[in-house]
Amino acid sequence: MTGKRKRKLNWFYMPAVIIMLAFIAYPLCYAVYLSFFKWNGYSVSKDFVGISNYISMFKDKVFISSLRNTLVYGFVCTFLQQVIGLTMAMFLNTKFKGRGIIRTVIYMPAMISGLVMGYIMYFFFQLKGGVINDIMSAFGMAGYDWLGNGTSAIGVIVFINTWQFVGVSMVIYLAGIQGVSQSYIEAATVDGASAWERFRYIILPLLIPALSSSVIYNLIGGLKLYDVIIALTDGGPAKKTHSLATYIANRYFDAERAGYAAAIGVFSFLMIMVISMIVNAFFRKKEVEL
């Protein structure tokens, strides 16, 4: 009877399985299939080219640049989000008037679409009429073309993505800190541990599960960054700010190289999956069991 009941309950999983197959498994398998063809994205015929698209990737200077940018968007943003988010969480865990409002304000950017955020910030960093340059002009300084230089444009994108989602890290760490038993903190205080020692040897080890969740969430988000880049630079200037995600769209729609775009997409998927698995395995070994 129990076995029959379990088999009947398994049918409740089917809607989720169907949705996953329709919107995740099928597109992924079709992308792998397309990656072995030369196709413009709309014609009936496709030319089989084997692994030529994958070989072409590593000869493509823009792909290499996009890969490097993707790693910067992923790892640099994640590092900054963890440091700033944890600092904010430690500060906002203390009791003072207005801390709830501050928490809300810090988290609010995460509720805004990345595309909308990109368009909003464009008016801050544009060369003519940008808020930043207007402020600089008011102090007698010359304006700067923040988005017209590849290096500074990447820095702006990193800043915006970090600022937009640092609130998510803050909330995750805040939940983790509030889950730490005060008895450990009180015992360490009685033993003469300093504030840094309490953080280093008690709070931080117990935050490993929260750290793992925050790092993986932010890392995946940074490695597949798309909307902010499209709104701010559209991959420019001279294709210097492309991520893999934006370069896929560029190759598919602008260059009409759907097979090549699919190959980049497959590579991007595998890269993000492998990095996520490595990071997750690393944090699993570090978790503290109570």
Image (cartoon, grey):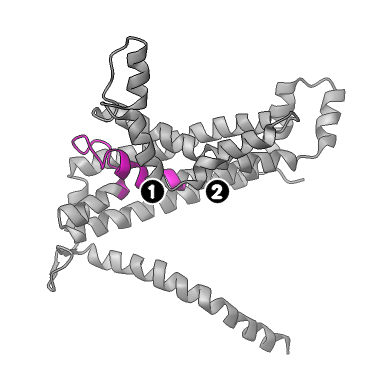
Residue 233: in magenta span: yes
Front residue (pair 279, 106):
106
Q: Position of residue 238 (x, y in %)?
A: 18, 36
Q: Dot 1 corresponds to which residue?
A: 224
Residue type indicated by callout 2: Ala
Give the residues in magenta.
220-245
Which residue is found at the position 27% from the left and 38% from the top? Answer: 233
Q: Position of residue 244 (x, y in %)?
A: 30, 47
**Image side of residue 113 versus residue 183, left or right:** left
Quadrant of the rendered structure where residue 76 is? top left
Q: How many marks?
A: 2
Q: Dot 2 corresponds to which residue?
A: 281
**Image side of residue 76 versus residue 254, left or right:** right
**Image side of residue 14 versus residue 231, left or right:** right
Front residue (pair 148, 194):
148
Quarter of the image with the N terminus is: bottom right
Circle 2 packing at 10 Å, graded few (<14), some (14-19), many (20+), is few
Q: On residue 77, which mark appears?
A: none
Q: Secondary structure at mark 2?
A: helix
- Front tag of 2 and 1: 1
From this viewpoint, is residue 285 visible?
Answer: yes
Circle 1 packing at 10 Å, graded few (<14), some (14-19), many (20+), is some
Quadrant of the rendered structure where residue 107 is? top right
Which residue is found at the position 30% from the left and 56% from the top? Answer: 265
What's the distance in space between the residues labelled 2 and 1, CA to CA? 21 Å
Residue 275: in magenta span: no
Front residue (pair 110, 53):
110
Residue type indicated by callout 1: Lys
In the rendered image, the residue lying farthest to the top is 140
Which residue is found at the position 28% from the left and 14% from the top? Answer: 142
From this viewpoint, is residue 286 visible?
Answer: no
**Mark 2 or mark 1: which comes first in sequence?**
1
